[in-house]
Image (cartoon, coloured by chain):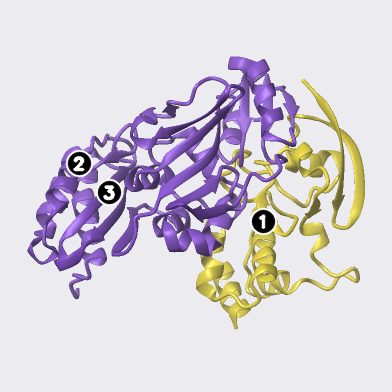
Chain colours: A yellow, B purple
Amino acid sequence: MSEHSIRTTVNGVPISKTVEARRTLVDFLRVDCNLTGTHVGCEHGVCGACTVIVDGFSVRACLMLAVQADGAAVRTVEGVAAPDGTLHPVQQVLHEEHGLQCGFCTPGFVMTLVAQLEQQPRPSAGEMKAALSGNICRCTGYQGILRAVDRLAR
Amino acid sequence: MKPPPFDYVAPRSLEEALEHLARGGQDARVLAGGQSLVPMLALRLARPALLIDLNRVADFSGATFGSSELRVKAMTRQCAILRDPLIAEHAPALTQATAFIGHEQTRNRGTIGGSLGLADPQSEYPAVALALGAQILARSKSGMRRIPIEQYFLGPYSTALHLGEIIAEVIFPNWGVGTVMLVDEVARRPGDFALVGLATALQVGAGGRISRVGMAWFGMAPTPRRATKAEDALTGELVSRIDIDAIGRLAVEDSEPWDDVHASASYRRTVGAHVAARSLRRLLGKEVAT
């Protein structure tokens, strides 16, 4: 079992830690960085709750090893709102359209949509819904989330 | 669950990776995009002693075209394949297949080499490679070889790669003018594994005669499987004379589907015949108004 020193930035903050090779990125964020906004759902790449942004791309943080993020810029749901607490437009519409109930899956939905809006300035509602196919929500019935997506597309 | 303990190396060159693989032997596994291997680690279905991560190997992604071949390097990610104009021009089936694979977040990591290396009988890329007549360029410490795709798939998750070999490239032949390609599948939800999937390439020559055909099923047999009978029936035939529904029924004769919780074998055969007929209608411009 090997251990590795890694240097990464998380939400713009440089972080240096030593991790076991088997440490997943999501456990690194939650346990080593104390950033528990990223949630672990299925832990094997099915539910999308742990979605974070690595070097501009949305990824499942349970399917990446922390050591693979050495040198990378990671962004989590904690880094999405403005420093003064103003919500990101994605967070704001999810809030207004009641796009969440228990909130467990929400960080994953937020990061997927944030990544897409940054990569593609004006995605259609259909394109955003397609991107969300990798995120599972077990309590909203998706209706509020889809209303939020429709508003983002406008 | 959490992955079991393992040693980890992230070589910067393929030569270095091959050294590690030769030393690690049976207990070493190569990590590409990790969208299948990492879940297997988490479920403890895989317990390698050494993980050799290819993500930092230099010059190991991208596509080039030359000498009538499209060469796609093994670590080319699915998200890159989806947007590559060279691939869309020379192997559009690969572009189409990619839209069916997993989700945005998994396509951002998953690679073509990883998919061909895993050889999941339900996945899209292996069937596209089979339909188009690709070759697998395998590298080892002792050299390299091209494995014809017909000899590559031995069973579910089993390939002709030897211990110590790593896929370096997937090489697609140029089908040339008059070629049309289509990947179609039926799945319960977007991103799910297909219940039935088919990759088809057709070349129509002078006089409206079909000169070359490649049809390969996925999710319909223990390996991707060519629809040889349908290919034979189509080759040399005039487009205007093809009985599309009959070919669709013929195409499933080469399949070997199974019963599981998602669908019965007979359902898969029935749907398969429709998928094959629908693919041919689209490719030959015989779409009927519904």
Q: Nearer the viewer, residue B290 or B21?
A: B21
Residue on which the image places disc 1: A58
- The x and y percentages for residue B180 are 31, 62
Label 1: element kind: strand
- The x and y percentages for residue B256 are 23, 35
| Camera-nearest label, 1 or 3 | 3
Q: Earlier in the sequence, mark 2 or mark 3?
A: 3
Kindly indicate the quadrant of the structure image that contains residue A93. Answer: bottom right
Kindly indicate the quadrant of the structure image that contains residue B94. Answer: bottom left
Q: How many residues crowd around disc 3 within 10 Å: few (fewer than 14), some, or many (20 or more)?
A: many
Label 2: element kind: helix
Q: What kind of residue is marked 3?
A: Gly
Q: Is residue B110 above or below residue A148?
A: above
Q: Mark 1–mark 3 contact, CB under 8 Å?
A: no
Pointer 2 chain? B
Q: Is residue A73 left or right of residue A43?
A: right
